[in-house]
Amino acid sequence: MWTEERLAGISPVGHTRPGVDRQILALAVPALGALVAEPLFVLVDSAVVGHLGTAPLAGLALASTILITVIGLCVFLAYATTAAVARRLGTGDRAGALQLGVDGMWLALGLGLVLAVAVWLFAPAVVDALGASDVVAEQAVIYLHWSAPGLPGMLLVLASTGALRGLLDTRTPLVVASAGAIANALLNIALVYGVGMGIAGSGLGTAITQVAMGLVLGLVVVRGARGEGAQLRPAVGGIIANARAGTPLLVRTLSLRLAILLTVVVATSLGPVPLAGHQVVGAVWGLAAFALDALAIAAQALVGHALGADDVPLVRALLRRTLQWGVGAGAALGLALGGLGWLYVPLFTPSASVQHAATVALVVAGVTMPMAGWTFVLDGVLIGAGDGRFLAWAGMGTLAVYVPCALAVEHLSPSGTAGLAWLWAAFAGVFMLARALTTGLRARGNRWIVTGN
């Protein structure tokens, strides 16, 4: 799936703007495709299960929220592996880079097995804690029980994708993610309706697809590792090193998840109209974030590679150019979010009051999008540099700044459209500004620039 010739073709070889742009786009465009393919799993599950009735669809909403949270907290498996593999590849040690990728996959498998057992055992208690009715809770637990066996595959997808990104290959994950989205749709339809399994079939179909995707991506890395003579057996030292490198990124991700959760809690307190509007704005914001995430992924891989190659001028060139791309992409997305909201918001809801609230909040979110682009890219640069410890402290610090602002919105702002606008001013404005300042100040210095292995 990948070759030395392909790697050489997109490895950093020059500091000119056209050369840097080609390197960024060669990684970012396929990465964007893979990122967009993944949400299709949730959309397909929702469409298939939705025709079973309200209770199954509500149960899927609860169950998918739990699974997304679990998997989201494990995204460090991709980020830490990308940075470590890219840096080792930059030193010219392909065997060592692939060894790190294999170690990351073993960590993912072990963690996935533990989480699969935990989700299976504690699904009823977790669902009950969310306060669902008995009929909805039953559907949610069924889905979690049937999808839990897929967790090792889901985490293996993260780790192997991280390894391939570190090897400067974002095309293979794109192909596998696209094929997986199609296979998931076919399996869900066959198991839910053809076999008559109901919501259990949706969970099983997703689990089978994720395991298959993990195996395919894992085999690509294993084949490369075998070709370079890297060890395929679990290396305790390497697994521990991967876990140690990923822990700060876990803390950083936790801070983001807590901020998002707090935003939902505040939106709920503002009333049903602001909450419904928040769902629309959050969905659109999440879609726009994929484009910025793709740039961040390119920054992770290229900066890690350049640091491994001891090429500090290229690191600085990549920093400048990816920031320009991030701000530019953010500005374009901001215009679409804020300027065209009146056009696409009615597709989400027929309610005039919800449409008005969402459209106004999208203007607020759109204004902040260039800053979000800056922030996302800097996040990727520092992850690629292995600066996870700083990102962990910065994440908790920015969360501490955001909490009082969000609570102030809950207690002081009016309900309705104005309340939702103030909430997004706090999240997309204050929270993102705090992240932009902390990461921006860090990037201006040199402490994060550590070259070599």
Image: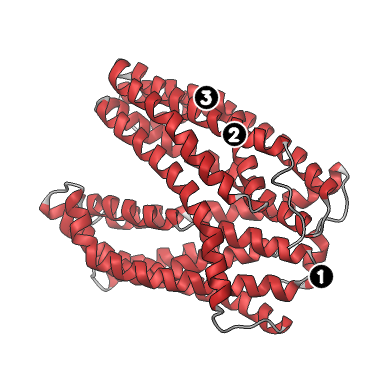
Q: Is residue 187 visible?
A: no
Amino acid type of disc 1? Glu
Q: Specify the quadrant that holds the C terminus.
A: bottom right
When asked about the image quadrant of residue 241, the answer is bottom right
Point out which mark residue 438 bears: 2
User: Which residue is at the front of the view, 292 or 202?
Assistant: 292
72 displayed left or right of 441: left
Of circles 3 and 1, the one toward us is 1
Disc 1 secondary structure class: helix
Left or right of 53 in this view: 191: right
Secondary structure type for disc 2: helix
Quadrant in the rendering for residue 280: top left
Crowdedness near tag 1: few (<14), some (14–19) or many (≥20) residues, C-alpha within 10 Å: few
Kind of element beneath mark 3: helix
Residue position for label 3: 338
Residue 247, x across and y down, in percent = 50, 57
Image coordinates for residue 206, horizontal then vertical, percent: 38, 66
Earlier in the chain: of badge 3 and badge 1, it is 1
* Up/down of 302 relative to 263, above or below: below
**Residue pictured at 31% horizontal, 65% vertical:** 203
Q: Residue at x 56, y 66 (%)?
A: 242
**Mark 2 or mark 3, earlier in chain:** 3
Structural distance between the alpha carbons of marks 2 and 1:
39 Å
Q: Which residue is mark 1?
A: 5
First in residue order: circle 2 vs circle 1: 1
